[in-house]
Amino acid sequence: MKGNIDLSVGVVAKLVFLYLTRPPPRCKFIQRELDISSATIVDYFSFIREVFIYWASKNSEVIGGEGKIVEIDEAKIGKRKYNKGRYLEGQWVFGGIERGSRKFFMVAVEDRSLQTLLSIIRDKIRPNTTIHTDGWKSYDCLDENSYSHLTVNHSVNFVDPHTGTHTQNVERMWLEVRKLVPRFGRKKTHYEGYLSECLFIMRHRDHRTRFHAFWKLAGELYPGLPHE
């Protein structure tokens, strides 16, 4: 871990536990609870995000396939109004979720061009998948790229009355992601860690298994740490 910071094992364990079980904002709460400096908090939060990124790199999976439905959508995460009408711009994120399973993906993107989104779809979704989207034009080429494509027009219906097409699962996923991403103090360079954290938390919903899984991963990433 961070060898230049002299915290006892017990304090570190409490810090990690509080991080894993409290939604943001949590920095000031943990600082008060453990009586440690903000610089130490920032350093350990960085360590925790490194573990999440390591987990995400090991658990990247392809979803969908023949007979499967995947809902895809893009969302701007972190755009907030503050101080006299000013805005934090946030980050565009593209994601998909497979119906009937807990499989999903999220990727930060710099743009929402056809080339960018189609490249991610090919990388993350198996051919012959039925893909449900909103009516955005960038998805119109999916039928020509080994996918069956159905749309729902959200300005008219949330569920298409004729085909049953909807994107309600992926919309719920964005609601959960927005709760997990910090409201303030975000840096674009940290978004990989934020999204990896969302994936980890959403896959480990039970606090006990989440805590155990985190320390096992930390032990793999930093072999000097105990992880069993």
Image (spheres, rainbow, N blue to C red):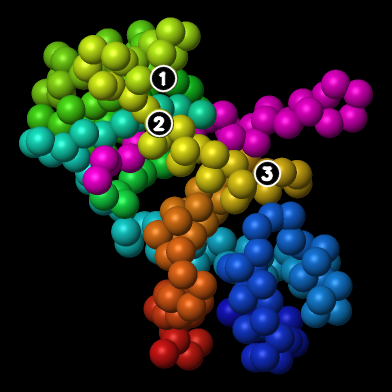
Q: Secondary structure at mark 1?
A: loop
Please state the horizontal and vertical placement of residue 155, each as a whole percent of the image: 47, 9
Q: Who is closer to the viewer here, 152 or 55? A: 152
62 to the left or right of 91: left
Asked whether the beta carbons under mark 1 and mark 2 sit within 8 Å of each other, the answer is yes
Please state the horizontal and vertical placement of residue 92, each as a whole percent of the image: 53, 30
Residue 46 shows which numbered tag?
Answer: none
Q: Secondary structure at mark 2?
A: helix
Going by the numbered disc 2, the residue's amino acid type is Gln
Magenta stretch, main secondary structure, is: strand
If you read the primary sequence from the N terminus, does the residue marked by circle 3 or circle 1 appear first?
Answer: 1
109 inside magenta stretch = no
Q: Who is closer to the viewer here, 155 or 184? A: 155
Mark 3 neighbour class, 10 Å CA radius: few under 14, some 14 to 19, many 20 or more: few
Please state the horizontal and vertical placement of residue 123, each as a whole percent of the image: 25, 37
The residue identified by callout 2 is 168
Whether residue 35 is visible to the viewer of this picture, yes or no, is yes
The residue identified by callout 3 is 187
57 to the left or right of 202: left
Going by the numbered disc 1, the residue's amino acid type is Phe
Going by the numbered disc 3, the residue's amino acid type is Lys
25, above or below 172, in the image: below
Residue numbers of the magenta segment: 76-100
